[in-house]
């Protein structure tokens, strides 16, 4: 069950980490859900056609970036309302991914399966009794997600790019006056968010289920956005929140397996309810980036 | 020798031509010269310099730098030409530290990583050399406006520039700081650098500038060598007519029998944004019809005092009473209802709602009063009439009552706050830097208004970095130093006395002249 917790936190953690960049730069991408679905499909297609898991991963990140690129274009270049643009991306991603899937594979009784992602045991460490199986017997996605936590923190807090991203979200006029390219920085942040979200989707399709289902993301994109806000845009807090979701999910699977006399639908809702309740109570007043959802034009004062 | 900057025939309009901010302006800045730009609020000074810095694109006109024609599309281009700018409304990211703000946009020696440590030490060095005290590790939101001003100046110096644009840099500096700052400008000039200084203080022009340009209503009014002109002439150029300054102040007479304490503060202590003690056991009172001037180096608790007295900051201990009613621990609304008016130092953060229009900002504290609303529905007719009256009375330069205040020039934004706060016969006025950024005419007008309010029986607490203003208006003067009042002296004290007290020397017995 503990190993399950670690695994099930990944499809929240990956998109949340990516969305930290996006939101810090002042953009609310409500399209994360749709981007994840596109990534899930892309990962599945990549593996189905090349039989190479690595290509599946790269392809999902790439398609995630393209899908998020639409969001970046709408919000940064066209200066469209971000809530509407993001919602459109979610709807588009959901429709397009299942349409493409059916167009390519037709309607089948049983969903097509691809090769399973191998578990990489980390030598020595995985031999530690008990702990070893929990932490060091996972597939590549899981390790990647966990490495990205400190890496995201490092990039945001300690690099010039991170400083630029934060400045652009807080006070784009000041950033602009200091010679920072506001639009470029925002594009990059949204694209990074897209790549992470694409990978998060691909984890569900090729890293967990070996197939693609139209409803497989199941609102995790939205949970990820909430996680980012409630964790006050900090990677380590986002990890804690994602783990919480993982615990609830693993618990829910356990309870169902034990045959607890509850309707399975109610049990399935457990992780979402638990996450939101805990997040709400833990997070005090979140102070949003000052330029959150506000498009930048130099001559507007 | 070619000019450092030559701008010809610059035109710039806003709101699709509704506001013509610049109309065929020519401007030349000599090399190794200090050039003052003068003009009333809204004359176009900031706009002209924003065009040079790449923040605004001119509709037409050409710019040459060092004799070569250039295209400046964005601030980055200006920086590449060695142009730096200290903005009227600071360009600082509030959630970041001073040091982070300084390195923002600069290449790092440890790329891709930041190098805050070496930036910090270089900053401390700069601040020592130039006598501008800053704390590189402090977050900007924790700083007072004066401290932010210093941070903004230091951050431009850090970059090293050949052409320095200063948009009202001394508005919140104390006289001593201004002196040091000007010394530094003199040094830069000696090194062959050119400086543009926008200011409303004529003395500064005669102190330090070589050349001056006056703008009026978006047009060039005159451009001259400072040695060939006089204060009267420059003023006439700015306003378009002769101006007489005669501030009349009736002498203050304390009514010995019945004490008429409008504002009383007892054992007041409070913390600043950093959680450190800002106000340390303050005791004072102000009577009806009296102005208590508060002098002092910015950052010694003045801002916190004003916030506490308007309910915007929690107090740790002590008591505040307005008109005999204790307001300790009450909400800002309670202070407003008791007739406490507030002219805040930071007009953007606490003074107004930047995205709302002029008329709404004028009633933002009274929207629930009978005159302006009925059962929660605003009466737009009354609101508009009020706006039209205020615009006319205070000569607010705006395209109309429905213009967003964001679009107004800094001085005109200040006038909106004054119109709102002074308009309804306040009992107590907490004025923090009320004339900051106002042109001479408007400054005179505001001072007159404050004196009028005093004569109508208001008790006024006046905080100002401008010692002359304090001396001119106050009935009594207190000096704040490290959260304490180093003595309250009668308004007739000398500049030197007060200067000493600002540095921490207490040469009066505290409370000696307290009423
Ligand atoms: N971004 C903008 N959008 C709309 N109008 C603007 C903008 N910037 C300036 N204006 C208008 O242009 C005119 C000139 O403004 P500017 O800020 O240059 O005045 P200023 O001379 O700097 O005045 P102050 O002394 O008050 O700072 C004003 O009428 C102002 O309302
Ligand atoms: Mg200005």
Image: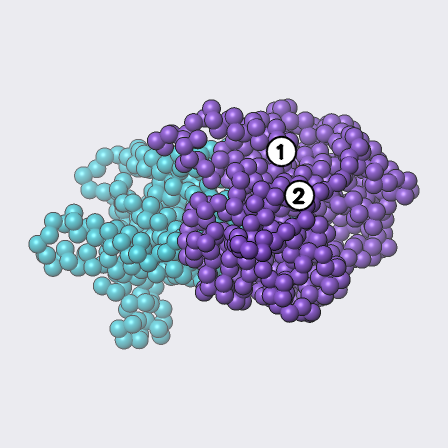
Q: Are marks 1 and 2 on the same chain?
A: yes
Q: Residue B155 at what x, y percent from top left?
A: 67, 55
> Callout 1: 10 Å neighbours few (<14), some, many (20+)?
some
Residue beneath disc 1: B394
> Is residue A251 or residue B386 the one in the foreground?
B386
Q: Residue B180 at what x, y percent from top left?
A: 76, 59
Q: Quadrant of residue B487?
A: bottom right
> According to the colouring, which chain is cyan?
A
Horizontal relation, residue A265 to residue B107: left or right: left
Helix, strand or loop under label 2: helix
Q: Earlier in the sequence, mark 1 or mark 2?
A: 1
Residue beneath disc 2: B447
Q: Residue B211 at what x, y percent from top left?
A: 85, 42
Q: Look at the image and tell me in which quarter the C terminus of chain B lies.
A: bottom right
Residue B143 shows which numbered tag?
none
With respect to residue A89, does B310 lie above or below? below
Residue at x 29% of width, y 72% of height: A131
Q: Which quarter holds ligand 1?
A: top right
Q: Is residue A105 visible?
A: yes
Residue at x 80% of width, y 47% of height: B203
Residue at x 35% of width, y 49% of height: A226
Colour approach in the figure: by chain
Disc 2 within 8 angstroms of ligand 1 (CB): no
Task: Give the colour chain B carries in the figure.
Answer: purple
């Amino acid at each position: 069950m503990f190993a399950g917790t670690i695994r099930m936190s990944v499809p929240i953690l990956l998109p949340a980490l990516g969305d930290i960049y996006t939101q810090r730069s002042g953009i609310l991408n409500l399209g994360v859900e749709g981007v994840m679905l596109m990534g899930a499909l892309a990962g599945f297609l990549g593996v189905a056609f090349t039989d190479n898991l690595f290509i599946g991963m790269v392809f999902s990140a790439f398609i995630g970036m393209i899908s998020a690129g639409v969001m970046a274009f709408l919000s940064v270049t066209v200066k469209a309302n971000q809530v509407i643009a993001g919602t459109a991306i979610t709807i588009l991603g959901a429709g397009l991914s299942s349409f493409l899937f059916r167009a390519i594979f037709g309607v089948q009784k049983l969903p097509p399966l691809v090769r399973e992602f191998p578990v990489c045991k980390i030598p020595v460490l995985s031999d530690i009794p008990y702990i070893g199986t929990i932490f060091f017997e996972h597939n590549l996605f899981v390790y990647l997600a966990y490495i990205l936590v400190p890496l995201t923190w490092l990039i945001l807090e300690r690099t010039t790019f991170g400083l630029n991203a934060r400045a652009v979200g807080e006070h784009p006029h000041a950033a602009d006056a200091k010679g920072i390219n506001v639009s470029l920085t925002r594009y990059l942040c949204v694209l990074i968010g897209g790549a992470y979200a694409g990978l998060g989707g691909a984890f569900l399709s090729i890293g967990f289920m070996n197939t693609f289902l139209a409803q497989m993301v199941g609102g995790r994109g939205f949970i990820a956005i909430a996680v980012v806000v409630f964790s006050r845009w900090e990677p380590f807090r986002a990890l804690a929140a994602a783990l919480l979701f993982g615990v609830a999910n693993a618990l829910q699977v356990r309870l169902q397996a034990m045959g607890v006399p509850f309707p399975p639908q109610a049990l399935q809702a457990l992780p979402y309810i638990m996450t939101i309740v805990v997040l709400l109570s833990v997070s005090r007043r979140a102070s949003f980036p000052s330029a959150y959802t506000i498009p930048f034009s130099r001559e507007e004062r | 020798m070619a000019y450092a900057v030559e701008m010809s025939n610059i035109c710039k309009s806003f709101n699709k031509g509704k506001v013509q901010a610049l109309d065929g302006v020519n401007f030349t800045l000599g090399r190794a010269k200090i050039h003052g730009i003068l003009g009333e609020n809204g004359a176009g000074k900031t706009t002209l310099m924003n065009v040079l810095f790449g923040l605004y694109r001119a509709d037409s006109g050409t710019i040459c730098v060092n004799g070569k024609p250039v295209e400046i599309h964005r601030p980055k281009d200006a920086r590449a030409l060695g142009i730096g700018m200290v903005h009227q409304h600071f360009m600082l990211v509030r959630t970041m530290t001073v040091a982070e703000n300084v390195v923002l946009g600069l290449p790092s020696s440890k790329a891709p990583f930041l190098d805050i440590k070496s930036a910090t030490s270089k900053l401390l060095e700069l601040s020592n050399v130039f006598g501008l005290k800053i704390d590189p590790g402090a977050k900007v939101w924790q700083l007072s406006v004066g401290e932010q001003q210093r941070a903004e100046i230091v951050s431009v110096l850090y970059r090293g520039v050949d052409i320095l644009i200063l948009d009202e840099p001394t508005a919140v500096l104390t006289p001593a700081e201004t002196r040091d700052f000007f010394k530094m400008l003199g040094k830069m000039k000696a090194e062959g650098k050119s400086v543009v200084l926008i200011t409303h203080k004529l003395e500064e022009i005669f102190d330090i500038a070589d050349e001056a340009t006056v703008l009026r209503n978006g047009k060039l009014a005159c451009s001259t060598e400072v040695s060939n002109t006089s204060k009267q002439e420059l003023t006439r150029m700015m306003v378009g007519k002769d101006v007489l300054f005669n501030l009349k102040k009736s002498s203050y007479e304390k009514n010995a029998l019945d004490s008429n304490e409008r504002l009383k503060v007892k054992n007041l202590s409070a913390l600043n944004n950093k959680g450190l003690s800002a106000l340390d056991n303050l005791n004072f009172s102000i009577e009806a019809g009296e102005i208590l001037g508060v002098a002092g180096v910015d950052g010694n608790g003045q801002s916190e005092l004003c916030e506490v007295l308007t309910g915007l900051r929690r107090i740790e201990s002590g008591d505040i009473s307005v008109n005999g009613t204790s307001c300790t621990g009450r909400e800002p609304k309670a202070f407003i209802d008791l007739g406490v008016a507030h002219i805040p130092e930071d007009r953007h953060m606490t003074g107004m709602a930047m995205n709302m229009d002029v008329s709404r900002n004028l009633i933002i504290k009274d929207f629930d009063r009978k005159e302006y609303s009925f059962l929660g529905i605003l009466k737009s007719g009354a609101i508009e009439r009020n706006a039209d009256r205020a615009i006319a009375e205070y000569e607010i330069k705006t395209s109309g009552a429905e213009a967003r205040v964001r679009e107004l020039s800094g001085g005109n934004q200040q006038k909106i706050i004054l119109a709102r706060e002074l308009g309804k016969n306040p009992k107590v006025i907490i004025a923090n830097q009320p004339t900051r950024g106002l042109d001479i005419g408007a400054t005179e007008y505001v001072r007159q208004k404050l004196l009028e309010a005093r004569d109508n029986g208001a008790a006024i607490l006046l905080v100002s970095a401008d010692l002359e203003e304090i001396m001119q208006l106050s009935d009594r003067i207190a000096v704040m130093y490290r959260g304490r009042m180093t003595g309250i002296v009668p308004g007739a004290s000398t500049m030197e006395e007060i200067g000493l007290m600002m540095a921490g020397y207490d040469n009066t017995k505290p409370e000696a002249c307290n009423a």
